[in-house]
Image: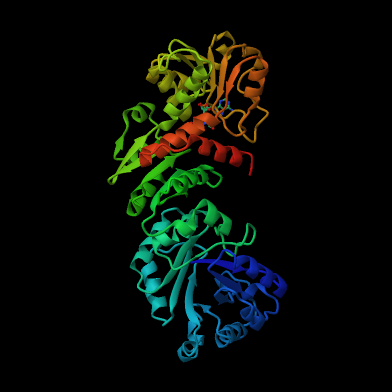
Amino acid sequence: MICIPIIANNLDDVLRDMAEASKCADIMEIRLDYLKNPDLRSILERRTRPVIVTNRPVREGGKFNGSEEERIEILKLAIRLQADFVDIEHDSIHYIRKDAAHRVPTRIIVSYHNFRETPDDLNTIYRKLSSCDADIVKIVTYANDITDNIKIYRLLRQAQLPLISFCMGEYGVISRILYKKFGGYLTFASLQKGKESAPGQISIHELLHVYQARNQDKNTALYGLIGNPVAHSISPVIHNTLFKEMHLNNIYVPFRVDKIGEFIREFRALDVKGYSVTIPHKESVINHLDAIDPMAGKIRAVNTVVNKNGQLVGYNTDCKAAIQALEDVYQASGMDAKNDRLKGRRVTLLGAGGASRAIAFGLQERGAQVTVVNRNYERAQSLAGDVGCFSKKSDDLPSLEADILINATPVGMFPEVNETPIDRGLLKPGMIVFDTIYNPMETRLLREAKSQGCKIIGGLPMFVNQAAAQFELWTGLKPPRKLIENIANKKLHGE
Ligand code: NAP
């Protein structure tokens, strides 16, 4: 079930939000502690969905600052008025007489909130709460690390009573999204952004439309993005739309990871079927996998992990994705036979980080003459040594003759959109200029290259290619490229 908390501070707004919430939620939580003079009778009479009545005190993260007696009286009234559920904090449950609660249809939720951490021993807390003779137990904690979600998962797997349990905070978002897979009784989602009743709560729109909450179940296969930060990634919307379009019972979520080793070890419990990997874990993840594809091993960076019967295997789809983006330009111009399009081309590659490594190895394999240029020259030399290509100092750029110029640095990326990695005077007509940056889609480098008569390629085709290759590695199915492109376009234009 999905529950929307109603956190308005006057009756009219409560009724308006209840009407709105009843269009998409199964149940609502009326947070009386947000209301000045709660007219509980009117609220309950006009409900169109089951409601949980909550009157949270400040000590448990709520807003009710009257006396405990007043607070409990309101909850007792909710029981007399036959509210569907009443939430009572674990340290106040003794105020509600069992017989009073059980003569009426109201179901009692006994709750525990911890806004600081997710304690190791959640079972002890669960045992204490489940001995209170409540109908439903609620244990909500704060995640300080992504692995705290696994504690909640383990707790939910063992619970005998219906249990609402998830982690708050950004690290805990996945436990809210995956509540069905984890076995939770319900999850909370805000009516809209800005109406959250707790940290980390996502909107009902995101839960239903990005994370397909209605289609998830216990058997939904899990995929996700490992990185930090991950909150603004467009990968969840892309892969979840593809899963939906292709009728796959899969879900893709963002994992904000600090300690990659611990994450990989702990999340084996969830049997995650595949990962995308992004900054800063593309290199460090390798030490924690069971096997590496030879090309990813050469590049020494993994951006895709596939779970093959419990074995985590690392791949690099950036390499093929960038090469394909370049080859497509030659194909579109009717130049050269496939696989031969890059042979002998003189390529100046700016940057010596993960993306550059992937592109340099791919170009070398295709027979291009690559020169790596990097701010830190030692890094350029080291990459050139690994690949078997050339390196130059940034000062030597003016003397370089190139058929293709590739920017694999973040120079020009949002928000520094007025920056460019190379002087426009060095861009020659007929040159192919490929900027791997996709936000913005047209960088200053590309604008200047276009005005100099160069052929340009933005970072979007590479992004689309690597996402499609990932999807294929995970599912064995070719996804509709056009769909990925459309979603990425929309998202990057802020829609
Ligand atoms: P990375 O591993 O952090 O490497 C960044 C590289 O850029 C390093 O060589 C660094 O030089 C250089 N650099 C950073 N800031 C610079 C500056 N102000 N001036 C000059 N050089 C600078 O990052 P990455 O993963 O390779 O990503 C690099 C770029 O590729 C990003 O813009 C990313 O968006 C893009 N990318 C695109 C796709 C796609 O699908 N389109 C995929 C992956 C990456 P030092 O060695 O001197 O620090």
Pick the residue in front: 247 or 55.
247
Q: Which x, y percent locates residue 475?
A: 37, 42
Q: How many marks?
A: 0
Q: Which x, y percent locates residue 211?
A: 50, 53
- Is residue 302 positioned above or below 216 on the image? above
Q: Left of 441 or right of it: where is 171?
A: left
- Give the residue drawn at x 53%, y 16%: 333
Residue 439 appears in which quarter of the rendering? top right
- Is residue 131 positioned above or below 317 on the image? below
> Residue 265: in sight, yes or no?
yes
Q: Left of 436 or right of it: where is 273?
A: left
- Colour scheme used in the picture? rainbow
Q: Which x, y percent locates residue 22?
A: 59, 68
Pick the residue in front: 183 or 471.
471
Q: Which x, y percent locates residue 155?
A: 37, 65
Image quarter in which the C terminus is found: top right
Q: Left of 249 or right of it: where is 92?
A: right
Pick the residue in front: 167 or 246.
246
- Give the residue drawn at x 47%, y 55%: 174
Q: Left of 439 or right of it: where is 471?
A: left
> Residue 285: in sight, yes or no?
no
- Give the residue drawn at x 64%, y 42%: 494
- Give the residue drawn at x 35%, y 39%: 476
- Is residue 171 positioned above or below 110 on the image? above
